[in-house]
Image (cartoon, coloured by chain):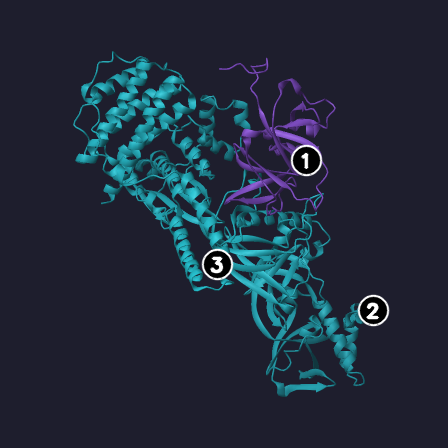
Chain colours: A cyan, B purple
Amino acid sequence: MEDQEVIKEFLIESSENLSRLDRELVELEQNSCEPELLAGIFRTFHTIKGTCSFLGFTRLESVAHQAENVLCRLRAFELELTPELISLILRAVDAMRIHLASIESEGKEAETSDGELCRQMQAAAEEGKPASARPVTEAEAAPPRGQNGVADSAIRVDVHLLDTLMNLVGELVLTRNQILQFTSSQEGAALNSSSQRLNLITSELQESVMKTRMQPIGVVWNKIPRLVRDVAMACGKRISLEMEGAGTELDKTIIEAIKDPITHIVRNCCDHGIEKPQLRKSRGKPIEGRLTLRAFHEGGQVIIEIADDGAGVDVEAVKAKAINAGLLRAAQAESLSEREALNLLFEPGLSTARTVTNVSGRGVGMDVVRTNIERIGGAVEVASQLGAGTTIRLKIPLTLAIIPGLVVALGERRSAPRPGRAGSEDGVMHFIIPQVSLIELVRLEGGAARHSIERIRDTAVYRLRGNLLPIVYLRTVLGCESGEHASDVVNIAVLQAGDRQFGLVVDGIRDTQEIVVKPLGKHLKGLTCYAGATIMGDGKVALILDVMGIAQRCGEISDNNRERAHGGPGSTLDERASGKQAYLLFGSGPYKRIAVPLSTVSRLEEFPQSQLERAGGRLAVQYRGRILPLIPLAPILEPGAGDTASGRDPVQAVVFQSGPRTLGLLIDGLADIVEDAASMKQASGRRGLLGSAVIGQRFTDLLDLETVLSAGWDEWINGRSNIAQPDLSSLATAIGPRVQVSELTEAKG
Amino acid sequence: MAPSPNSTEAQPVLRYATFVVAGHYFGTDVTQVQEVLRHQTMTPVPLAPPVIRGLINLRGQIVTAIEMRQRLGLAARADSQEAMNVVVRTDDGVISLLVDEIGDVVESEPGLFEDPPESLDPVLRSLVSGIYKLKDRLLLVLDIRQTLNLDAVVVQLAG
């Protein structure tokens, strides 16, 4: 059943290809040997040959193969283009047409003999001159016409026509919206019901037009297993195939455009990438090679990854080959980076395969891949590790695709960042975040809006369910007036960019819409922050944000900051917190995760309320014959914050001791003890905190023990005025030079 | 094949769509001009070079609008004055040029043509391929390809 589908497609495609070949060959004869035209013809034969080979149409394949040989030599200027040669190739086209007709009507190739034709072509390719052109009646016989069946059952529609249709529907939607608005203010049932019908029909039309364009990538992938199997058999290899994300939907035009490239890449991987079983065994790899195809959305693009665990690309061999082929001078090759060298694979006429096989190795495949992918505005990347495999990533843009997106607003752009313009015609700008990148929305109001976003040097962070989420202001990213002025509401869109998450702060969140992605003009292609643009319901243009691009832009910014931080005045803090050590983690008041080095902690204690002694608002407990002052930590860190610790029963205290001085800090609860090197330090302006660090992979505040103890002590001792306690005076002495009057006053204020 | 009225039959007659930018009278090959539009709602593009004024919706097609005053290094337009759009077709798609006023279509008279003077402002000179000395004023022929080559703008700004 599946094969029937494949063959049907092959027939439609080939009949189209052949008619194009007829035209192009004649054109070639007239424009004697225009390289681009020749390359196009060559590719067409190559494609037909490739498809034949895995569908098992050997005769068709051999005709195409011979024709390709001739063209290959023409392309290398080793043959002169003569009318005889063109006739020869045209005859090959006719012969192929006969086979196609036969496949369509009989289900198999025609019983004609192409031997004579093939011999002539072979001779032509070898000698540079076609053998005496004896007519081959079978091949010259006109293909049976008038029974095109399958080929007629599907219509191919020009992309531009679909574009036009799409635009017209868009316009219709806008007009419909206007009419609906108008009729809602009018009386009259007839008009109202008509406009309602118009509304319905328009929506349906829009949906249908959109649907005509979407297809799952599985349409392309259905062919792959058979292809892999056949190539593997032909090469005597064992290859297992994994495919993920077959349901990923792509625009029809994009599906069309990536079909050939994917086929080429897969064939290349199987043929050149994955080694023969013996070789794999000797290299200590599993005998069975693995080929993985993955398709997924990422940052507003569809990524198609084709990875093998084969031999990888020998960069030096690529360079040598490129020098041989005259693409590169030896001196240039020296200075090429590995990535640049890998990109040479996409140059026409370069193949590292040592032998030209039936399957691949002419150096035509990757050339076609790049041409086709770039035509739809995509990009191809190769990553390869010699001996470990090759990964080819196709980045397919969402151009022409329809995606759900979240409309966000950036309000009141008072001054655009452009000199000489007071461009304030717009109160609010709308942007669209592709839904695929959106994880959740967080809205902070009131006090939370002002305080929840914390800063680590120039990087803003928000604690999202205990995890540290870097915060990026869209306003800043887009270079509109910097500064997140205090606002009562903060909207954070939590976005996924690759394997990272970040929060994008926007001024307003509107709604989710299905949007038609339209490409930006050439002049704006360089702006990585945008994936495209779309037209909103009111007819205005809105830019679609490229989440990946924004993340990269911010990554650069924060990288710079990090560099600046090094060697800066904050280094004492770095020293203090560097190295691995055990931290006691606890919570106090608004701070859910405070850390102190465990080595500074004397004891952890719990006291029942009944043991506590209160005097003048002070708390203490008798402990081992002494008075242990108990000081709630929260009010020290956050003056005015409620004391949530001393009301508990039992209260929890962390006891610190330094010489004879002993103090208990009352906390809300112990969290954990972890051993970690406190990374990502940031000094804090807050009293009682050294700063912030990531401890145990979570954002944690480091307690400034000295300050807290002296401040706590100060409060405690001042509070208890007249009551004298002998050991307390000694405590005060023990605190020593740290507790100076000036410091105390400062701490109180 | 009737002989052309002029003796210079070798020179094909070119027709220019004309427009005014900051008092200067420009013309561009009329076959490149797709249409002329009144002021359009514009969506600014943050981070874009200043010469790109924004994007407009041209019947469902998104078109980049280039501020000609900025491009030509001329004074900015007063806020009260609305820009007109000269929509031109290029190899890279459709682009809108923002100008002050739209003029008539003018036929070229090869005899009146002259290269731009050396002393002309270098930015302007790089974009003007020639000048027609019309009776009442000078018609500057705008080189669209150069005008839309914004890489040059960056260099100018940097230099």
Q: Which residue is mark 3?
A: A180
- The structure residue drawn at horizontal position 18% and vertical position 19%, both measured from the top left corner, is A137
Subunit ID for the residue under disc 1: B
Classify residue B29 by image quadrant: top right
Subunit ID for the residue under disc 3: A
Residue at mark 3 to residue at mark 1: CA–CA distance = 40 Å
> Which mark's residue is nearer the viewer, 1 or 2?
1
Of residue A431 and residue A691, the one placed in the foreground of this image is A431
- The structure residue drawn at horizontal position 52% and vertical position 26%, both measured from the top left corner, is A333
Q: Are marks 1 and 2 in contact (CB under 8 Å)?
A: no
Residue A18 x/y as whole percent? 30, 28
Q: Which residue is mark 1?
A: B21
Residue at mark 2 to residue at mark 3: CA–CA distance = 73 Å
Residue B76 x/y as whole percent? 71, 40
Mark found first going from the N terminus, 2 or 3: 3
Of residue A252 and residue A464, the one placed in the foreground of this image is A252
Subunit ID for the residue under disc 2: A
Q: Which residue is mark 2?
A: A742
Classify residue A38 by image quadrant: top left
| Residue kind at label 3, given as amino acid type | Leu
Quick one: label 1, few (<14), some, or many (20+) residues within 10 Å? Answer: many
| Residue kind at label 1, given as amino acid type | Val
Of residue A522 and residue A748, the one placed in the foreground of this image is A522
| Residue kind at label 2, given as amino acid type | Ser
